Structure formats: C-alpha cells, structure tokens
Amino acid sequence: MTDAPARFDPLPDPPPASPADPPRFNIVGDVSVDLVLGTLDGWPKIGTERLLPRSELRAGGSAANSALAARHLGLSPHLIGAIGDDDLAQWLLLQLSGIHVDLQTCSSDTTMSVGLLHTGGERTFFTSCGHLQHLAPEFVLRHLPPAAPGSIALFTAPFLLPGLRERFAALLAQAAARGYQIALDTGWPPEGWTPQVHREVAGWLAHCDHLLVNELETMSIAGDDSLESAVRRVAGLLKPGAHLIVKLGAAGALGHVDGRSTLHVTQAAADVFDTVGAGDSFNTGYLAARLNRAGLSDALAAGCRTASAILPRFPRKRIAAGELAHCLQPQP
C-alpha cells in the first residue's frame, strides 16, 4: 500500500500465466466511502435541517460496488484501487474483508460521496475529490498479474481518476497484452460530452471486449438521440467481436455483437429504496457469467438477476459472502 508517482512509465510485461491457471476477475477503479440517506421529498430550504429515516455508511465507488457484488455471488475478485491516509481509510479496508485488495495509499483524505435518495427513485450525489485524484497507472500495472485465457479486467470510472485518465488507453492496451479481456464502464464525464471527451473515449473503446454503459451514456457517446442508431454507432467504435452492453434500468438490458442485438426484459423489483450501485451489480453478474462461459443471453439474465437481488436489500452490509450465488445458476 505504498504511494506511486503520478507520471506513467509502462513497466516490462511479467512472464505469461500458465494456461492451466483459472481465469482471473480483476477490478480496477474507484474505491471510496458512501453515505446513503433517504428518502427526501422535495429539496429543503437552505439553512434548515431535515431528519431522514434511513441511512447506511458503506464502501462505495463503482469498483468497490462491483467487488462487493462479486463477494455476494461467492466469487474471489481482485480489487485494485486507492485509499486515503486517514482513519476512514482503515474503516474502508474492514468493509472489504474477504476480497483480495491492492490499494495505493495516497497522501489525502479518503474520498466520500453523500447520496440523497429522492421520492420517485431519483438520486443526488455530493462527492469530495480526496484520494481518487492520485491513483497512478504504475501502481495498477504493478498489481495486475498475467492472466490465463478467459480472464477479465473490469475498469470503472476513468473520469474520476485523473491519474489514470491521462494515459488510460495505454493502460488498457497493457492489460490486454497481459491476457485480459477488457471490460469498461465509462461513467459520466464531469465536463460533459465535449468533442475532446468524444475523441478520448473513442481511443478507449478500441481496446474493449465488453463495454458496459447505460442508455443515456450510449446515446451521449454516439451523439445520437435514437438508442437504436446509437447502438450501431458505438458498436462501430469497438474492436471486432466486442460486446456492447446497454443497461436499461428496471426494463432490463440489451447486448449487441457482430451486428445483432439481444434484449433481456425484466420486471421492476418491488420495494426498492436504494438504487445506488445498480449498474455495478449488473456489471458483476454479467461478467461473472461470461467467466463461466455463458452466452450473451444467459449473461444478460445473470446481470439482471444479480442487480435485482442486491437492490432490495438494505442495509447491504448484511448480505453474506456467497449468499447470492444462485443468481449465476442457469434458469429453466
């Protein structure tokens, strides 16, 4: 857990993994602390106080959410990210028990997000900059081992990680050279989808085997208000044979590969108070199924089952390791 320099000097590739090794599931990205509060009915007047009936302090960030979902499914993921150097960082480590972690300790307060859940399902987040500003690509590569065939490296939230973002395409290329299928959840750029962001993201997508984005992100990347045509445009930015996965919220998910689309429709889960991390839970279920060599349709279904099983649970820290393993079982 030592700090690493902010510049990017690619390290020599380590010896290749043995084909006999099991596939790895590595997750690289944002690890922080979430304070989830709700439900808020209308925005309060500045200077007032409001009591909210439900709350949970927990590990957060897309990468940590994905790793925790993997633990719920009974998997053994490898999480690579960063933490601060304060007491909250030590608490965060305890929440990730049972997960193989390599976390760069940064000279900074731990990043925290306060998520306010509104009546009707909308959410508002307030996030501090904190340690996420300092995660370095050298640290990631130092802890990203060679991979056996079928291994997957999921990268999350590059827009929140300026130390990685600066050389993100090169980082993805190095991970692919080590034998990983590259999965990416871009998240939303704080500056919006500017022409420069579009050029930047196009460079990332050329390395992706699985692009996991929601409906609005798909249309924003494509610059198109029609989801159908946006899917075709974004798929054209991926390398041949790559899978574009569009998360449709409570409606399900759509997968597109080699010019063909597959839609998995779900029913909205009842009594969902906390939708934070829904997409991250889906990502893990989908990728876990792909690690088990499931086809596209079955993997979409596994992703939706995983999200549907996690979202109604509150607080989520009560979900035991392996409790949701049934989400990966083929359905009749």
Image (cartoon, rainbow, N blue to C red):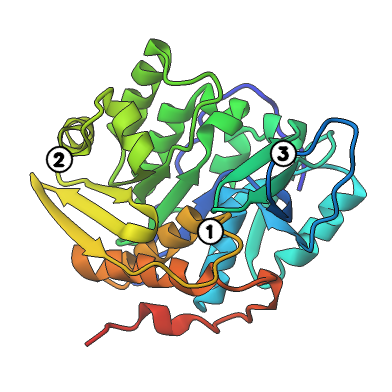
Residue 252's spot in the image, x, y percent?
31, 60
Q: CA distance from mark 3 to mark 1?
A: 30 Å
Which residue is denoted by mark 2 in the rendering?
Answer: 240
Q: Residue at horizontal 24%, vertical 53%?
A: 254
Which residue is denoted by mark 3 in the rendering?
Answer: 43
Q: Are marks 1 and 2 in contact (CB under 8 Å)?
A: no
Q: How would you rate the neighbour count of disc 3 (Cα within 10 Å): few for under 14, some for 14-19, many for 20 or more?
A: few
Q: CA distance from mark 1 to mark 2?
A: 26 Å
- Left or right: residue 87 compared with residue 257: right
Q: Earlier in the sequence, mark 1 or mark 2?
A: 1
Amino acid of disc 3: Trp
Q: Looking at this rendering, what residue extends furthest in the left direction?
A: 259
Which residue is denoted by mark 1 in the rendering?
Answer: 66
Q: Is residue 77 above or below residue 242?
A: below
Q: Identify the image quadrant of residue 106.
A: top right
Residue 4's spot in the image, x, y percent?
71, 33
Is any part of residue 272 visible from this angle? yes
